[in-house]
Image: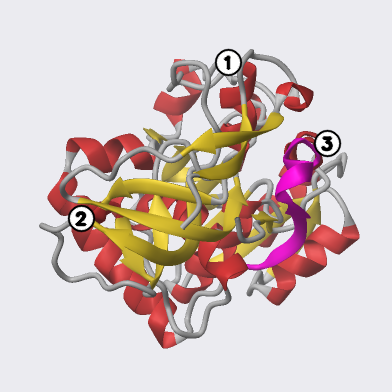
Amino acid sequence: MTTTYRAAVCRELGDPRVLRIEDIARAPLPQGWVRVRLAACGVNFPDLLMVAGRYQYKPDLPFSPGMEAAGEIIEIAGDVAGLALGQSVITRHRFGGFAQEIALPARDCLPMPQAFSFNEAACFTAAHMTAFHALTTRAALQPGETLLVFGAAGGVGLAAVEIGKHLGARVIAVASSEDKREAARQRGADETLAADAPDLTARIRALTDGAGVHVIFDPVGWPPEEATRMIAFGGRILIVGFAAQIPIYPANRVLLKGASLVGVRAGEFGRAFPQARKDEMKKLMALAASGALHPFVSKTFPLEQAADALQWLAERRAIGRVAITMEPS
């Protein structure tokens, strides 16, 4: 085993070009931890925000982005049970995945579903857990209800389409291009609409016979005056993120619709309620093992092009998920 590994490192905040590929000295493995040689790392919008210093969580500089990855265990501390050398795992962390390897607590490793490639496994937990947590725990989406997904071809949006359909909802997907709308249809969307359609609100109300949708899944920051017209009485608006803007909801419209504004912060929920997260993860991994859920990875970049991978997300060019692939040390 070599004494160093390569990583994409952020030493100053800014756009993706601040990342530099560096050799990192391997540290001793603490008790309760494992070391994983990474094959791939998923690229998420929070990675981009973290590098820019605009995310809720701000790691100390320097750091490597990367919230989820996949690879093989190459070292195990003496007190760790239940994991084996050479085992393929998914790793979960706030940062550190843009690297050839990572050391982390054993509890933050999940056995990799057998049907997944490393690229797929590296792109599964963040987006799919966010969507699963939002639609089940936060919105209690029911069979027969109508789900409206904005940004439906992004990583978390496409996961919401797939999970919503699995839960028995009628899914309306909104995306910016025909290629993105086709991706949503392939994942189960019943209807797709263009994000820039001038009559979008009217079309959504027409599709629901004037009643509106039961649940809105919004990772974009849709204009609240439109969202409150689209929601049904008693509906739930899931505030998942702000890829475009931070909306300010008028209380009178929320009141008139008897609607609920529901904040979705899946990662923080897991830290606040660890047992509830374990239950969610067990259900999510069972769905992956059964073949019901499967991440769509449309683009990969080598580690040396980590900045390009983040820029790809910044320019809204991704359909589904983007992964960074590693080479052995």
Q: Label 3 vs label 2: CA separation?
A: 41 Å
Q: Quadrant of residue 47?
A: top right
| Magenta-colored stretch includes residue 307 | yes
Can you give x and y, in whole percent of width and height, for residue 284 in the image? 35, 68
Residue 53: assigned label: 1
Residue 128 appearing in the image: no
Tell me what residue is drawn at x 81 percent, y 40 percent: 308
Q: Residues within 10 Å of mark 2 (few under 14, many from 20)?
A: some
Q: Which residue is mark 3?
A: 315
Report the amino acid beneath label 1: Gly
Q: Secondary structure at mark 2?
A: loop
Residue at image position (59%, 20%) is 247
Query: What's the magenta region?
Result: 296-308
Going by the numbered disc 2, the residue's amino acid type is Ala
Determine if the magenta segment contains residue 168.
Answer: no
Q: Looking at the image, is 99 positioned above or below residue 262?
A: below
Q: Nearer the viewer, mark 1 or mark 3?
A: 1
Q: Are marks 3 and 2 in contact (CB under 8 Å)?
A: no
Locate residue 214 relative to residue 197 in the image: left or right.
left
Of residues 110 and 316, the one nearer the viewer is 110
Observer-side mark, 3 or 2, equals 2
Horizontal relation, residue 163 to residue 286: left or right: right
| Callout 1–callout 3 Cβ contact below 8 Å | no
Residues at badges 2 and 1 in contact (C-beta under 8 Å)?
no
Q: Residue 250: percent from the left, percent from the top?
A: 51, 16
Residue in the image at 23% along x and 38% along y = 271
Label 3 sits on a secondary structure element that is loop
Amino acid bearing label 3: Glu
Query: Does residue 72 appear to the left or right of 223 in the view shown?
Result: left
